[in-house]
Image: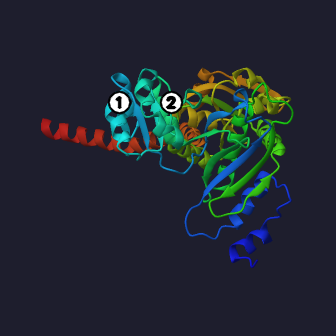
Amino acid sequence: MKQTKRHKLFSEKVENTMLYTLEEGIKKLKECKKSKFDENVDIVIKLGIDPKKTDQAIRGACNLPHGTGKTVRVLVFAKGDKEREAKEAGADFVGGADLSEKIKGGWLEFDRVIATPDMMGEVGKIGKILGPRNLMPNPKTGGVTADVARAVGDLKKGQAQFKSDKGANVHVPVGKLSFEEGKLKDNIMSVVDTVNRLKPSASKGIYLKGMVISSTMGPGIKINISGIAEALRRQYHEIFSQASSCILIETHKLTVAEVTEIRKLLSKENCGFKVLKNRIAVKAAAGTPFEQAVPHLTKTRALIYSAKDVVAPSKIMSKQVKQNNKMSLVFGTLVSGDRVQTLTPADINALGNLPSKEELIAKVLYVLNAPITNFVRTINEVPASFARVLQATADSRQSAA
């Protein structure tokens, strides 16, 4: 059979029998792009589970660090205060029986459904419509919750939901082909870590068996999945070992737009930002100055770090935390030679309030220049004062005459 130009390109760029590293796979996928639109990027993870056994079924959700690149229309079944909270959080549609009746009539212009527990009776009436379309809210993915504001926020900022299929695979969207390679890598690593943490106790043997990355019009590229976690551990270990300043913050409610803005601010000061995978970070911290932060690696944590500037991370983040109540300072470290200084939130704020290098230079120059300026002003003032005294004396004599 004659190959098309597209398939010929794929065969030239990708070796079907080869296992690529994640970095190589993403690069190959980008090299194979020929379409004019921005393709979706997905991964398929092969799991070591028995899909016929319900106690080994996998279902979950992962908040992607850089989002999916898609606009998600969120529908929420809620009433009273929860209805108001959902609307304020940015839900596109909020209601109860009115929405279920509309859906019964064929309306399906939404992508995700959230419901408060007390509204599941209403949602159950349209279960036969939502279920086959994978739209039925599920508590395992955060779809059935009283915290509707957080659930809406997670979906809006880029939450990927997944479940195992009959072939023991999970299919997960991880972004767009236009994403930077590093952002796609971060998203994929987050998904792999989330899936790995959901391993059923009944699953025996190798759990993560394989992975394929692909785009809408691109080839399927086999990835060496066993090397992903180790690559992330090495990356963390290098940061923890070389950083002169590390600040740990809690940041589970930030939107992708807010994270992007913070990254830009930090980048200008040569600082980095990483949403940490705690289990891997704990292993990576061993033997590094950041090892003292291990007890604080719980919940959702982000790391702000700098290899050279010990003040910049504290200065930027102490200000950001004051402006945005979705973040809070947790812990920090400063490294000078062999000495490691731990930082409390109060210490981080104190460092953040220090003047900048430019401000310090200006103050030093002011102190140095002030006596000279005053001296010159005094010297210059003597002739003028003397002239005024002479003039006043002359005036008084004329008046007396």
Q: Quadrant of residue 217?
A: bottom right
Q: Residue 346, percent across and down? A: 59, 21
Label 1 to label 2, Cα distance in Å?
29 Å
Q: Quadrant of the C terminus?
A: top left
Q: In front here: 115 or 31?
A: 115
As drawn, 159 above or below 249 = below
Q: Quadrant of residue 192?
A: top right
Q: Residue 48, percent across and down? A: 80, 37
The colouring scheme, among rainbow, by chain, secondary structure or one colour, is rainbow
Q: In front here: 329 or 2?
A: 2
As drawn, 231 above or below 323 = below
User: Label 2 sits on what residue type?
Assistant: Lys
User: Label 1 sits on what residue type?
Assistant: Gly
Q: Residue 331, percent across and down? A: 66, 25
Q: Residue 97, percent across and down? A: 33, 30
Residue at 66% from the left image edge and 67% from the top image edge: 33
Residue at 19% from the left image edge and 38% from the top image edge: 397
For numbered disc 1, what is the local secondary structure?
loop
Residue 375 in sight in this render: no
**In the rendered structure, which disc, 1 or 2, sits on the residue that comes first in sequence?**
1
Other-residue count near label 2 (Cα within 10 Å), few / some / many at <14 / 14–19 / ≥20: some
Tell me the tag on residue 326. 2
Q: In front here: 39 or 163?
A: 163
The number of numbered discs placed on residues in the rendered structure image is 2
Residue at numbered disc 1: 96
Tell me the tag on residue 318. none
Q: Is residue 208 left or right of residue 119?
A: right
Q: Quadrant of the N terminus?
A: bottom right
Residue at 66% from the left image edge and 46% from the top image edge: 171
